Every structure is written in C-alpha cells, then in structure tokens.
C-alpha cells in the first residue's frame, strides 16, 4: 500500500524550505527541538560561532529557552530586516506566552511553529498533551491561531504567516499522520485563508453541520458519510480569521437556519459554542489526558468518528 500522507508538522518541513527559498530574509529556530518540530531550513547554515556555525546562518539553536527565543524573535522583527519564526512543542508555548503577548500587542509578524498539538502526542502523557493551550492562544488579541488539517491547509497557513505584517501567527501542527481532506486543493487553500470554509457540501436538504479543526476534520468527513446526504462539513482552521469575514460569507458557511450543529476538537470545548449555539453540542476534551498510544487516547477520550456520529444523532 502507498505510505500514509504526512502529518502537518512533516508537511511543514517541506513548506518552510520552499518559503525560505522564496524569501531570503526568512529565519527559523527551535528550543532544542529541530528534529521534532521539523522546521530546519536546509542548506541555510546555523547561526552563531564555533561548531560549524556562522553569523550568516538562518537556523537558530535556542536551547531549552522558550522565553528567550520569543524575545529574540521579537527583536528580529523590531530590527525590520528579517522575517522570523521559532518553534517548540505546543504545550511549552506557556513558557514564552509573555513574549507572544508582546508580539501581538506590538504588531510584530513572528511565526510560531507549535507542534505535537493534542492528546494525540500519546505516550509522553498529560504533561505533554495540550488540551487548553490552543484556546489559551486563541483569546490573545491580534494573534491568529491556525490549526490546519492536511498538507494544503498547512501550506496556506504558512503562506499567511509570512504575509501578515501587523501581528503574529501561531501554526498549530499535528504530530500524527492525517489523510488528505477530500476537496480540491484550491478550495482548501483559499478556505484556510478565510479561517473557515465548507469542506463538504450537503447533497440534499441541509440537516446537520459538523465543524472541526486540525486532525479532527478527518473524523467529521467520515461521520458525514455515515449520517447521510443532509450533512455539511466545515473546516475551521482559524477562528479569528473566520470571525473577520463578512456577515454574508459567515452565513454562507454556517446558515442560521441550521441549528443542528456539532463541533469537534481534541481540546477544551468552551470557544466552540459561539459556532454551535445553545442548541448545538461540542465534542471536546475538558480534562487532562493520560499516557498511552495516540489512537488509544483518542478512543478513550471519545475523539472518534463513532462518537461524533452518536452525538450528532442526539440533535
């Protein structure tokens, strides 16, 4: 059988190198996690002195210093020449939250590459499984938090992060493999730039809307096939961008007439209620995870197609 499609963090490795080739001022770095974050710019050299490094290098080795990394990225932005990105595991974003907040406040276009984004991290356990972290970043004003679900959404998210000039972008990337979402490439990429879009149109009279982000969009696609022709699937990689769209566009994606809505994300559920309303439901993870392979944590914490189908049927 053909190999499975890569996870978004691996897709990011390909995309970041294309960006670096097209944008000579793009630099990157990691808090001791280049191998896991997959954000190394190939052939660009390492910044510093000694150990083969030079001051022309574009890869920064920050060590386990997330706060310092965030501060340096801000400084590079203030300098006005470079387009910086920096990376760590999502759960460690709290260590540099103050510098991320400053980037948002000061309108600095830093890109944060935050991988290993949910309970799917698996065996590392609840200390490394972010459940509240994505929502915690989404509430920072002027911070666009993008959680793509496949290669095309990831490509669009990266592109957005280096073209936004008035604030930072957090790229939330999944560790585990995910399938390519079933829609034309242009639909996914343009839809991601609007924050949310109709991934799968209903084939009959609209009865339900399933909304998801990141690695959970695949479950919404699969659930729609089981639930029938009246189900629409909406991918919502970036809430803040979707919220900025025109009322007409938002109505075209989430028509008010359809109140049978379920949102799904492997994280805390609170922010999703603005899209499902009082009559809708959210399938989330409002607790800490546990140490087990990712597929087991998803199953035990009810992040599966079956659980989404069962919840939709209660509406």
Image (spheres, helix red, strand yellow):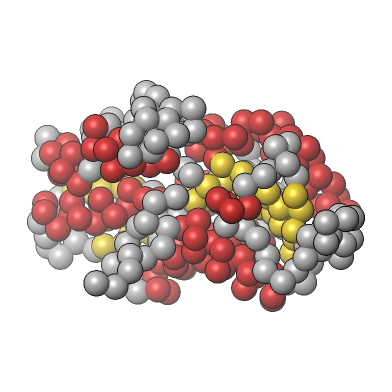
Is 309 placed above or below 6 here?
Answer: above
Please tell me which residue is depicted at 69% across the width and 75% down the height of the picture. Answer: 21
**x and y, in percent, of residue 74 in the image:** 79, 45
Residue depicted at 74% across the width and 64% down the height? 26
* Quadrant of image for the N terminus: bottom left
Q: Which residue is drawn at 42% across and 30% down?
A: 125
Quarter occupied by the C terminus: top left
> Is residue 181 shown left or right of residue 140?
left
Vertical placement of residue 34 versus 264, above or below: below
Residue drawn at (68%, 65%) of the image:
41
Front in this rendered view, residue 58 or 262? 58
Q: Which residue lies furthest to the front in this view?
A: 51
- Residue 278 occupies quadrant: top left
**Camera sees residue 174:** yes
> x%, y% of residue 309?
15, 44
Q: In which quarter of the image is residue 158?
A: bottom right
Is residue 254 placed above or below 159 in the rendered structure?
above
Residue 260 visible in the snapshot: no
Expressed as whole percent of the image width and height from the top left, the position of residue 86 reads 68, 50
Residue 137 percent coordinates (x, y): 57, 37
């Amino acid at each position: 059988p053909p190999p499975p499609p890569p996870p978004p963090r691996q897709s990011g490795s390909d995309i970041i190198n294309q960006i670096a080739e097209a944008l000579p001022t793009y630099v990157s770095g990691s808090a001791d996690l280049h191998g896991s974050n997959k954000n190394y710019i190939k052939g660009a050299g390492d910044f510093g002195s000694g150990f083969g490094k030079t001051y022309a290098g574009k890869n920064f080795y920050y060590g386990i210093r997330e706060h310092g990394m965030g501060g340096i990225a801000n400084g590079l932005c203030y300098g006005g020449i470079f387009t910086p990105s920096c990376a760590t595991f999502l759960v460690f974003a709290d260590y540099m939250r103050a510098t991320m907040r400053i980037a948002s406040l000061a309108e600095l276009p830093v890109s944060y590459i935050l991988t290993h984004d949910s309970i799917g991290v698996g065996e590392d356990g609840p200390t490394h499984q972010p459940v509240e972290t994505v929502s915690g970043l989404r509430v920072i004003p002027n911070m666009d938090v993008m959680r793509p679900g496949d290669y095309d959404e990831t490509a669009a998210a990266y592109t957005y992060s280096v073209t936004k000039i008035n604030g930072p972008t957090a790229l939330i990337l999944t560790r585990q493999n995910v399938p390519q979402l079933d829609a034309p490439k242009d639909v996914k990429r343009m839809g991601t730039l609007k924050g949310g879009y109709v991934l799968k149109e209903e084939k009959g009279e609209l009865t339900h809307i399933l909304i998801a982000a990141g690695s959970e969009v695949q479950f919404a696609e699969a659930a729609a096939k089981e639930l029938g022709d009246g189900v629409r699937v909406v991918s919502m990689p970036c809430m803040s961008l979707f919220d900025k769209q025109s009322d007409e566009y938002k109505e075209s994606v989430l028509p008010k007439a359809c109140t049978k809505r379920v949102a799904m994300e492997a994280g805390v559920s609170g922010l999703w209620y603005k899209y499902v309303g009082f009559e809708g439901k959210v399938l989330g993870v409002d607790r800490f995870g546990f140490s087990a392979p990712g597929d087991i944590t998803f199953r035990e914490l009810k992040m599966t197609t079956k659980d989404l189908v069962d919840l939709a049927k209660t509406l």
